């Protein structure tokens, strides 16, 4: 089997911190910590219940954010909540025996009262005007283990396959696990000696003591625990023994990471490098170039085929096209080859762009059921590298494949971009003909309402040129129809579909009068 070289590159700039994860020089993950944005996932709040809506099976919690947090009833006391947190590992099967399952007699009207205080942890970032999603199953993550208050169990990561190692870790953890607390041992704890495990437990226990003090002292709503920054969290979760090297271009961050690794995995320190020189760190392995490509709708593949990735309000749609690919075999074989290549690229793009929610994929049509199965299995196998929870169903009768991917934070597109003020997120702008129609209708309404007959209309220069080159008689038509004297001027500050109308008599903007 070909070896995969996994590397982490961290770039610190005025705009924030970017963390790139590459596999054999190919960018597979990009994490961005913006300078103007405070990450909320993992934070714990002492909140106040604002509303309980049984019809929605949810409650709304005031945590001090501009929008109330959303607490589904399914996130109250459910053991599954741990899987939704931003931690790398799940506990093993034995751990669930000690967890607090949802009470079948749970009555939201009695058990949740408006005005009561409640401890919640953010599991999804706020998005599109919606508040953050929270759970009552709070957890304190460490480097080697996760502390779970109000639990009473020991969980070992499923990724630790050696049963003897599992037993060893369980014996060690059992000696210092507090009563009525759960402890989940993470994958990175494999092979670590007792001193490192004890040190990590002390760190998470101290965090809990501090949190518990704040809970008792502070009035709701209040932040009582702030999780790691994005860069620290990535190091905590991604810097495993499989990483070949970690390169940083900032001295202060290099020192902080170095101190952290010495405490947790001293044998890994040699993999940490500080980039020296004047070159840009993301020029290595063409990372910057790969980032630019990840923001485009169209993704080209080696065969000449391509993907088209479209974001909508409800879902993400991915279309597979043969593009420039010219096969030498029959149509079915060619389609199968493209679809298999597309499956691997789709899995990479989902990780890289951090696309979550409902995803619909339109592969090239395949007639053979066995070939559809091959494509499905290829996508499912490749998605196993993804740390996010993924659910995948087989091809529908219409040849579409549907899947969901866990959404925690903002996807890459929303992280690095803002809504276009011209098209308002549509990706298309109004045609010149439509703008002229709107202007004509505005003049008709204004003629009825106002007495002004001498107007100055300002338009984008491109729009003015369009009128004089192709619609030279339009303005004179407007004047005769409405019995007005109209002057046209260019305004570079206006978008192509905007116009402003000024009254020469009143010497003021009258655009909003009708």
Image: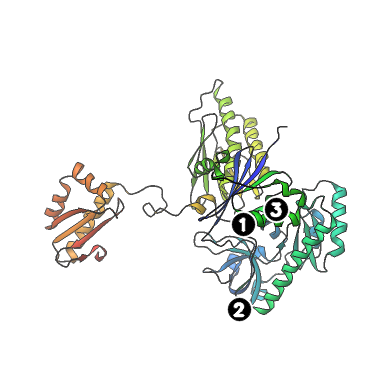
**Rounded to the nearest whole Å, what is the CA distance between mark 1 and mark 2?**
44 Å
Label 3: element kind: loop
**Residue 457 horizontal side relative to residue 126, left or right:** left
Query: Would residue 100 be seen by someone viewing this image from the given angle?
Result: no
Point out the tag, 2 or 3, that comes first from the N-terminus: 3
Residue 88 shows which numbered tag? 3
Q: In the displayed structure, would residue 293 be above or below residue 64?
A: above
Residues under labels 3 and 1: Cα distance?
26 Å
Q: Quadrant of residue 337?
A: top right
Residue at which label 1 appears: 252
| Residue 449: image location, x then y, percent | 19, 66
Pick the residue in front: 290 or 502: 290
Q: CA distance from mark 2 to mark 3?
A: 35 Å
Q: Which mark is residue 504?
A: none
Residue that mark 2 sits on? 115
In the displayed structure, would residue 459 be above or below residue 287? below
Marks 3 and 1 close (CB-CB < 8 Å) = no
């Amino acid at each position: 089997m070909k070896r995969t070289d996994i590397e982490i590159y961290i770039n610190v700039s005025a705009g924030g911190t970017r963390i790139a994860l590459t596999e054999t020089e190919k960018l597979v993950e990009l994490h961005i910590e913006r300078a103007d944005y405070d990450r909320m996932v993992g934070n714990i709040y002492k909140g106040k219940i604002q509303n309980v809506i049984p019809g929605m099976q949810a409650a709304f919690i005031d945590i001090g954010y501009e929008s109330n947090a959303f607490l589904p009833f399914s996130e109250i006391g459910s053991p599954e909540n741990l899987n939704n947190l931003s931690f790398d590992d799940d506990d093993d099967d034995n751990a669930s025996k000690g967890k607090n399952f949802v009470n079948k007699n749970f009555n939201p009207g009695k058990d949740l009262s408006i005005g009561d205080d409640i401890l919640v942890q953010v599991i999804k970032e706020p998005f599109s005007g919606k508040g953050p999603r929270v759970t009552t199953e709070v957890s304190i993550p460490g480097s080697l283990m996760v502390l779970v208050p109000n639990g009473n169990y020991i969980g070992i990561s499923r990724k630790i396959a050696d049963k003897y190692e599992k037993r060893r870790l369980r014996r060690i953890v059992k000696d210092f696990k507090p009563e009525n607390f759960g402890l989940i041992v993470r994958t990175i704890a494999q092979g670590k000696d007792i001193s490192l495990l004890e040190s990590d437990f002390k760190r998470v226990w101290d965090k809990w003591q501090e949190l518990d003090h704040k809970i008792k002292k502070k009035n709701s709503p209040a932040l009582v625990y702030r999780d790691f920054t994005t860069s620290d969290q990535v190091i905590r979760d991604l810097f495993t023994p499989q990483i070949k090297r970690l390169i940083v271009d900032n001295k202060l961050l290099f020192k902080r990471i170095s101190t952290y690794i010495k405490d947790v995995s001293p044998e890994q320190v040699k993999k940490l490098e500080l980039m020296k020189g004047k070159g840009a760190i993301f020029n290595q392995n063409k990372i910057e170039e790969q980032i630019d490509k990840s923001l485009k709708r169209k993704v080209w593949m080696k065969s000449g085929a391509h993907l088209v990735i479209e974001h909508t309000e409800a879902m993400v749609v991915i279309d597979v096209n043969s593009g420039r690919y010219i096969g030498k075999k029959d149509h079915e074989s060619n389609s199968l080859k493209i679809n298999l290549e597309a499956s691997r690229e789709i899995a990479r793009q989902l990780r890289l762009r951090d696309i979550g929610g409902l995803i619909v994929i339109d592969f090239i049509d395949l007639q053979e059921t066995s070939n559809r199965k091959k494509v499905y299995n290829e996508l499912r196998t490749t998605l196993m590298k993804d740390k996010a929870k993924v659910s995948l169903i087989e091809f529908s009768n219409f040849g579409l494949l549907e899947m969901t991917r866990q959404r925690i934070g903002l996807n890459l597109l929303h992280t690095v971009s803002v809504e276009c003020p011209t098209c308002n997120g549509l990706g298309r702008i109004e045609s010149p003909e439509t703008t002229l129609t709107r202007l004509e209708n505005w003049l008709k309404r204004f003629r009825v309402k106002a007495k002004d007959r001498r107007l100055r209309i300002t338009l984008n220069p491109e729009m003015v040129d369009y009128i004089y080159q192709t619609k030279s008689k339009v303005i004179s038509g407007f004047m005769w129809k409405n019995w007005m004297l109209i002057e046209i001027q260019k305004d570079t500050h206006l978008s192509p579909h905007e116009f402003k109308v000024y009254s020469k008599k009143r010497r003021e903007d009258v655009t909003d009068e009708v």
